[in-house]
Image (spheres, helix red, strand yellow):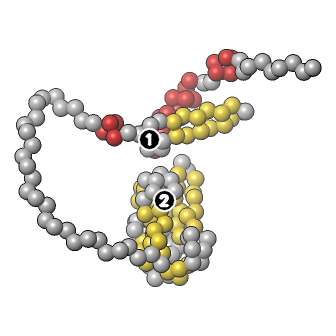
Amino acid sequence: MAEPKAPASKDAASSIDPRMVRRLADILIETGLSEIEVEHNGQRIRVAREITAAATTVYAAAPQPAPVAAPPAPAVAPEAPVRGEQVKSPMVGTVYLRPQPDAEPFVRVGDRVSEGQTLLIVEAMKTMNPIASPKAGVILEILVDDAEPVEFGVPLVVIE
């Protein structure tokens, strides 16, 4: 009969380099990412943080006067229905509309694109990630500028 495997030793946890964990945590803060995972020499380290609205709480050093009531907002007409499909950023990074600084853009407003065609790239942690068209259609709008930083889920392009 085979011997049962011994539970993982506590030595594995103690062999984790705390400097590496701190460096990964610094990268999370610098880039605005919510988690990062690295594997090196068979050792995997995952660092994650929870981003909450409470993190943006501002504490006042002195009592603040009571807020003055704002005038009522003017009535706003309902937004017109959005035409086309928005292609959103799948990650935090920097958008580039062209493959090289001196090259033509991947696409322009009015261009006909095919499914899978590269629309732009998002650089994240020194890696260029092509963003492909989810469908064939026409570029209605480009919602970002070249070299603009973007967050996860930000609309980049509208395709009809």
Say whether residue 123 is left or right of residue 1: left
Q: Which is nearer the eye, 123 or 155?
A: 155
The quadrant of the picture occupied by the N terminus is top right
Residue shown at the point (45%, 57%) measured from the top left: 153
Callout 1: few (<14), some (14-19), or many (20+) C-alpha neighbours within 10 Å? few
For disc 1, the marked residue is: 30
Q: Which is nearer the eye, 133 or 83?
A: 83
Q: Position of residue 35 (x, y in %)?
A: 52, 40
Q: Position of residue 6 (x, y in %)?
A: 78, 18
Say whether residue 72 is left or right of residue 1: left
Q: Which is nearer the eye, 26 or 117?
A: 117
Q: Amino acid at mark 2?
A: Ser
Residue shown at the point (46%, 53%) measured from the top left: 152
Q: Which is nearer the eye, 4 or 86?
A: 4
Q: Amino acid at mark 1?
A: Glu
59 relative to 89, above or below = above
Say whether residue 47 is left or right of residue 56: right
**Can residue 100 be seen in the rendering of this structure?**
no
Farthest residue in the right direction?
1
Mark found first going from the N terminus, 1 or 2: 1
For disc 2, the marked residue is: 89
Residue shown at the point (48%, 66%) measured from the top left: 87
Q: Position of residue 158 (x, y in %)?
A: 45, 72
Callout in the foreground (1, 2): 2
Instruction: Please identify the quarter of the rendering in which residue 135 is found.
Output: bottom right
